[in-house]
Amino acid sequence: MEQAVKTEECRRDVETGHKLTGEIPEVVRRLAASCGTSDCFDHVSPVPIPSRESVVEIIQSVRRILFPGYFTQTKIDLLNLEYYLGQEVTTLFQQLSTQIVWSIRHDCFRYEQACSQCSETGQEKALQFIQSLPEIRSVLATDIRAAYEGDPASYGFDEIIFSYPGLFSVTVYRMAHRLYELEVPLLPRIMTEYAHSQTGIDIHPGAEIGESFFIDHGTGVVIGETTRIGNRVRLYQGVTLGALSLPREAGQLLRAKKRHPTIEDEVIIYSGATILGGDTVIGARSIIGGNVWLTESVPPDTKVMLKTPELVFIGHRTGDGHG
Amino acid sequence: MEQAVKTEECRRDVETGHKLTGEIPEVVRRLAASCGTSDCFDHVSPVPIPSRESVVEIIQSVRRILFPGYFTQTKIDLLNLEYYLGQEVTTLFQQLSTQIVWSIRHDCFRYEQACSQCSETGQEKALQFIQSLPEIRSVLATDIRAAYEGDPASYGFDEIIFSYPGLFSVTVYRMAHRLYELEVPLLPRIMTEYAHSQTGIDIHPGAEIGESFFIDHGTGVVIGETTRIGNRVRLYQGVTLGALSLPREAGQLLRAKKRHPTIEDEVIIYSGATILGGDTVIGARSIIGGNVWLTESVPPDTKVMLKTPELVFIGHRTGDGHG
Amino acid sequence: MEQAVKTEECRRDVETGHKLTGEIPEVVRRLAASCGTSDCFDHVSPVPIPSRESVVEIIQSVRRILFPGYFTQTKIDLLNLEYYLGQEVTTLFQQLSTQIVWSIRHDCFRYEQACSQCSETGQEKALQFIQSLPEIRSVLATDIRAAYEGDPASYGFDEIIFSYPGLFSVTVYRMAHRLYELEVPLLPRIMTEYAHSQTGIDIHPGAEIGESFFIDHGTGVVIGETTRIGNRVRLYQGVTLGALSLPREAGQLLRAKKRHPTIEDEVIIYSGATILGGDTVIGARSIIGGNVWLTESVPPDTKVMLKTPELVFIGHRTGDGHG
């Protein structure tokens, strides 16, 4: 009997399957028809596009080169170090060249520009990026030291390199910013958005950030495209360095203008503070307290805090014998 | 000598290993014994369960269908577009059917309901979902245009589609919401929580959201289950559209009631603002400033801002010759 | 003709490639030279290091053991449950032993301590961890019930276990805290930072947290190293339990002191609230309102809220006939 039920169920299943898959071609036709209309964003073209997976591999390769031995199970010692680096850098050059060439070609195709030298330009930019790696490494060394000094919970440099999201996001930002300077399209933002998805820290590749930079905890931090940050600055979670609110129509006019603040050397900004506007300058060595909302400049050596807000205390269970 | 030390160390190691693994069966016994008691949540049953990995594959498949050519290295041109879509949609139908059937069966099993037609129902819902894809695509096209218009840092539609977390989370929400409307259990929330883990944007699949919706940056955004959002609304990072605080005991009574606010057309809500309560309505075209905390309605065409909080400025290093 | 252009382009490409790769050895030399200087953090040594990938596998293995049947497609029933657990626990023991031994060895190597018994110690700690699993499971059962009771949007325990980021982060924290108690270096923080990257919830493994703990939504939550949290406490997104601001120089002196607050039983803390300082105690059953900033203690049974901030309402489009 049970067997009969199972067989019946199975037969109905197959029939349903057949009936329903018969409906699929009609949906496919509608989907294909909407391509090329304003109802659909498609990328139907013979030009290959940059791949997020490759960008993530590039980030990991750069980290292995910048911090040799930390992110690989390969045994590295002083004897094989140069071979190890040689192999990693060569692979990186090939992979990065491909992605840069594709990004440039994609842009040419999109904006109908000539692309006679996309390939050479792409390879040259990849080399220029790689030639910057020693410099990026030495700036990151200052960032790591700043993390150790700024965080009493840190037990050592290794812990910072292995696990701190602030260092990860700043590492990716420093790569992406170099590619942004080299005017590589698309890749820099894909990189920083990958770091954003891993850390909750959203740094636009266009921002300019000095050495010994430390972001603690970090979730919710936003640093806008035209922000300028000096040396030895420290931020906590939830800090926004953003643009002032815009009238609905003005958005497009503001592209490429300085819309985000300037933070001078040795400033500390505590959690949840929001600093907005392209003319806003936070002077050197100033301290911005938690949750402060600032749209105007602050002179150097100043401490800005919210006036302690009035709190309402209500004894909500007094006298009920609880506890 | 060193060899002797090594051998000794190795011998001790093996002995320790043997001694310690001898303790494992006792732990396994205790772990097995606690299954079926209130000390353990287990899912010991012959019914297969929905798989997070498959749900992630479904999300990626839907994105490839909605935005052809963006998330694949396959070369797509107008000649092979329909074949490409046909293949993707067929695979999606099979994978989604399986997961929906499993979700429905799982629920029947959990709540001891009859499941005579789980399989047919599941396949029908999968087809209904797929038939909604053209409509989801055209709503997403309005979201992409809204992102481009709302963000002066955006350089083009491609960058938005490749890398904006706001668009990713809204894409996943629009799929999940359709499955929620089709009363598919479990899958919708697994989908939106995946997007939450990738973006920091937490949209409940039950929320109702109109077209041309844009979330900028997005980390920390929370949009509750019974929220209603009109057309052309823009949100920034850290915005909460939530429920009012509940007495500890009332939680269960509130299920399925409208507990979250209504946001009418063309409202802008700046970073960190919190709007709470099922009766709270933000009227059309209103602007809610950063960090505002609202538990009551706002009429249309209104701007609500925090009264500039008093800031305390202290010259914390004046006259010490620093700098 | 076109063919000729292509060939020419191809020839130039290859030449560029040759020319540019000729520059790579010089960069490699500079990168290798900076290793061992203060410009570079490297880990050039024959000692293997803990691997993030393995740590993620350990987390997944522990979840499969704690919640049998939820995170695997293997069919588990009461008959094979003990075999299933036996196999999982044995594999976990081996993998965890290896990672703990590597972490301890790594620390010995870094701080030039003797490591005569690293291997035995590591295996013993792995066993002690595994022996704690039944207890961790029963505490997590209280956390799951607290989530169900605290969230009117939850439809059942399965949804919580499959998809709630709060439960995921607390599960990982409870593992990591046990390893922290066992004084395992590096691994606990790698674990909690993995959970942080998945959920936006940053719990230091050193924090002490009682049973029936629930974090709703969770993005942006920070719980510092020396925080103490009682039983039946509930937190919402964006809550910080942190340290008071430090003078720039004092960071190192504060290591290992109690710098973070104490939260007693049954406290509720709403979204965006910040509570700072090692002497700050929030008394039992107190409720802390959204966005409150607290640096002093609160007695039991107290409700603390921001005094409703003055809002400025501006009719920004009144009379323009819009809408």
Image: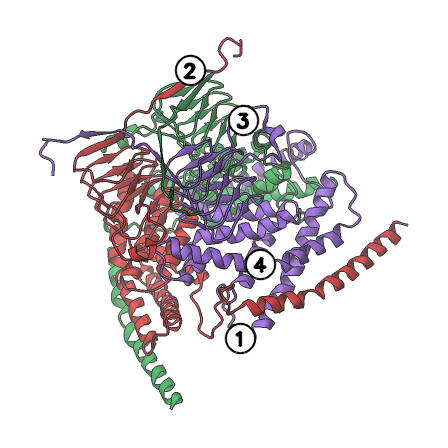
Chain colours: A red, B purple, C green
The answer for how far apart the CA atoms under marks 1 and 3 are is 55 Å
Crowdedness of circle 2 by 10 Å Cα count: few (<14), some, many (20+)?
some
Cα distance between the residues tagged 2 and 3: 21 Å
The numbered mark, 1 or 3, whose residue comes first in the sequence reads 1
Q: Which residue is mark 3?
A: B246
For the residues carrying marks 1 and 4, which lies nearer the camera in this image? Answer: 4
Residue C259, relative to residue A11: is it above or below? Answer: above
- Spatial distance from mark 2 to mark 1, Cα to Cα? 70 Å
Q: CA distance from mark 4 to mark 2?
A: 55 Å
Q: Which mark is residue B78?
A: 1
Three-letter code for the amino acid on which mark 1 is drawn? Leu
**Closer to the eye: label 2 or 3:** 3
Name which residue type carries label 3: Leu
- Tag 2: residue type? Pro
Tell me the SS state at disc 2.
loop
**Is disc 2 on the same chain as disc 4?**
no
SS assignment at label 4: helix
Disc 2 to disc 1: CB gap under 8 Å? no
As drawn, the label of residue C299 is 2
Asked if the residue under mark 4 is in contact with the one under mark 1, i.e. CB atoms within 8 Å, the reply is no
Q: Local crowd at mark 3 within 10 Å, few (<14), some, or many (≥20)? A: few
Give the residue drawn at x 33%, y 36%: A271
Using the numbered discs, state the Cα–Cα distance from disc 1 to disc 4 in whole angstroms.
21 Å
